[in-house]
Amino acid sequence: MLIVQKYGGTSVGNTDRIKNVAARVAKYRTQGDQVVVVVSAMSGVTDNLIKLAKEIMPLPNEREMDVLLATGEQQTIALTAMALHALNVPAVSLTGAQAGIVTDVVHTKARIHNITPKKVHELLKQGNVVIVAGFQGETPEGQITTLGRGGSDLTAIALAAALKANLCQIYTDVDGVYTADPRIVPTAKKLQEISYDEMLELASLGAKVMQSRSVEFAKKFGVVFEVRSSLNNNPGTIVKEETKSMEGVVVRGVSLDKNQAKVTLVGVPDKPGVAARIFKALGDAAVNVDMIVQNVSHGSPDKVGATDLSFTMDKPDLLKAQKVIDRLKKEIGLRDVITAEKIGKLSIVGVGMKSHTGVAGKLFETLAREGVNIDMISTSEIKISVVIDLAKGEAAMKAVHAAFIG
Amino acid sequence: MLIVQKYGGTSVGNTDRIKNVAARVAKYRTQGDQVVVVVSAMSGVTDNLIKLAKEIMPLPNEREMDVLLATGEQQTIALTAMALHALNVPAVSLTGAQAGIVTDVVHTKARIHNITPKKVHELLKQGNVVIVAGFQGETPEGQITTLGRGGSDLTAIALAAALKANLCQIYTDVDGVYTADPRIVPTAKKLQEISYDEMLELASLGAKVMQSRSVEFAKKFGVVFEVRSSLNNNPGTIVKEETKSMEGVVVRGVSLDKNQAKVTLVGVPDKPGVAARIFKALGDAAVNVDMIVQNVSHGSPDKVGATDLSFTMDKPDLLKAQKVIDRLKKEIGLRDVITAEKIGKLSIVGVGMKSHTGVAGKLFETLAREGVNIDMISTSEIKISVVIDLAKGEAAMKAVHAAFIG
């Protein structure tokens, strides 16, 4: 079997941990598997390099940032190869460029264009474990690039696709994907499998297992991957295209995002272009707006219809959003602006919702029974999110988990 | 003017020093010069990487060592480019591979095969300062290599040759090459110029300004270079092919190597192959033998002629040498083995010796006047070395410097 394994920064955080990684890789190889290992920079290394760069200038050139940061993963590949040698396992390291990972020229957040893993195939054929630097590639002109946050996952999944690997394992410091955060919901279960779409919704809901772009890439190229822990031998969660059997489960997971804030604009004039103006200004100020809910228009004193418009964003963006709104308030003619920080966004996710009715009703009923008031509602084909009082968030989550999952 | 400047690990030891380097480079550029900067790893970085590797295994694979160590210089090039950007000077960093430095495949001590500095020329033409990672290159097959000790000097000199640079400056923490170590001889003067051959002799005599191989490379390709300090603006020492005027100076420099030890083998049978056996065994044990002196053969009790054979080596190698000799003692039939650690090797170097007579006589006379006994003598065309009592080394050096230089 050809397996691609990815180990994150914590899993290779010091030389002892690198030795552990090598031992795990060696075990698979002894079973007769061919193994390609993708590693991140040792935890702390990237941050330290960023610190050095900031000492030199606050906003360093992005091309040079890539030259600098790519060294972190390059160090790990060499050390990991050595750790395999220490176990008498033949191993060769490759930088992203050497592994044939070609990207566009958008430095610090490059996209993978194509992978020509000729060298990887050659080395595997010779009996080597191949260690590839995650998070990096090179442009067709030979410039070093990095792939941005979650880049090493992306390297692993893209390599698995290019190599037509039988298995892609993403090793991390959690056991897999859970039906809910086990620290909040003790009855949460590790999922054996989850669909790409469900994983994407959970990723965007703050379940910090993986970045959305890696899951999107896996979905696009049909790469089945497993999220599992580098600290034990438990099987993890398989992420793959949804199957008929998955649809039998209505709700795959429940999440609670405590890190959101809400702004309500009261009396937004009901004229074309007003909403566009507001959200363009917020976008220009780099406010990452999440949910948007607009109430039904109702009459206002000055004859022009007016609506109430609420939106949520990550809490740290609230200050920026307030500045933007203050600037626009008069210009647009808002009656009032109300902000709320003590909110939680509770979501249920499941591909089964597509074929099941009454899910929303059951959710609202469960919340009502808990005395939880619903502030905003937003739905997609496979997700329902509600904004509620933060203080009631965890109790609500437990109740919803119990109602849908058990 | 096209200038290649090389800055060592101390000169780029922290971000403040990197900013200083950038300021100096910017000054040359403001004068209208084109500048190519070669940098080493920040001091401490390489040692730390070696430490990590040794934690994983005592004798790490050399290919992987190169992948690991090359990251040190790659970090410095990015940071140096940023520091130039901070001064509004356009600058682009290149790894050894990107700069077109092609080497053989002898990992950790690769030799430069050829340089195709197409990219460097292009970037210079566009008005950039080009920052090149010292100490590294790549094989024709795209493997990362490093050049071994003194590798960054070699990169600078080889680049200067390939680019046909007008000037090559080696910035270090000393002001240039001196007639003697100023800490021992207060009247020592900084040399304005010195020939390659003199510099080579001084390098091998422990004047630790530069490794011999970089000087040899410069001599071979006729690269004139200047050794100077990165801490001030003083002119340094120009190293170049010897000129007629150089021959007017009999002695360019005086050196004292206190780090040698001596072994004398008494009664070495005067048969063919005995010396070969001894020095092959020493070589196999990695004892780096320096001077060898064999006395005139004299009769011995057992009819076979016998000679006394003395050799010197670096002090740390003495123990290894003793072990080898102990093993051979009986086998070869040595009468006795005498070791001495309290010795110094005093040398005078100068191309002028070729055309001047009486230099040796004057040296011996000077030493005699100081009451210094001469233990061993070794000469080359442009050098005379004597082994003397370590206790009298510094006084002897002062006297010799006074007699020949002033």
Image (cartoon, coloured by chain):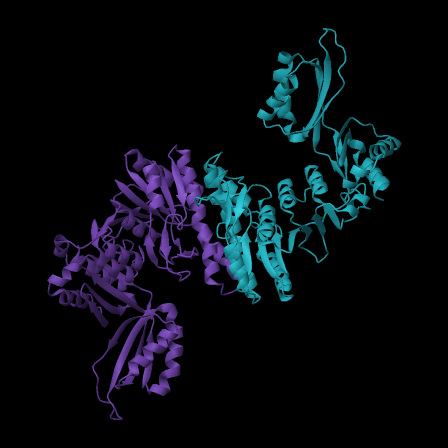
Chain colours: A cyan, B purple
> Left or right: B333 with respect to A122?
left
Horizontal and vertical percent position of residue B394: 27, 61
**Which quarter of the picture shows residue B377?**
bottom left
The image quarter in which residue B131 lies: top left
Residue A246 vertical placement versus B257 (above, below): above
Q: Is A312 above or below relative to B33? A: above
| Residue at the image position 33 percent from the left and 87 percent from the top | B333
Q: Residue at x 53, y 55 (%)?
A: A77
Decide which of A238, B64 is in the foreground and name it: A238
- Give the farthest residue toward the top: A302
Q: Nearer the viewer, residue A24 or A42?
A: A24
Residue B361 placed where, x, y %?
Answer: 13, 67
Residue B151 appears in the rendering:
yes
Residue B175 seen in render = no
Query: Looking at the figure, which quarter contains the N terminus of chain A?
Result: bottom right
Residue B393 appears left or right of A335: left
B307 left or right of A366 in image: left
Residue B12 location in percent, x, y?
A: 40, 45
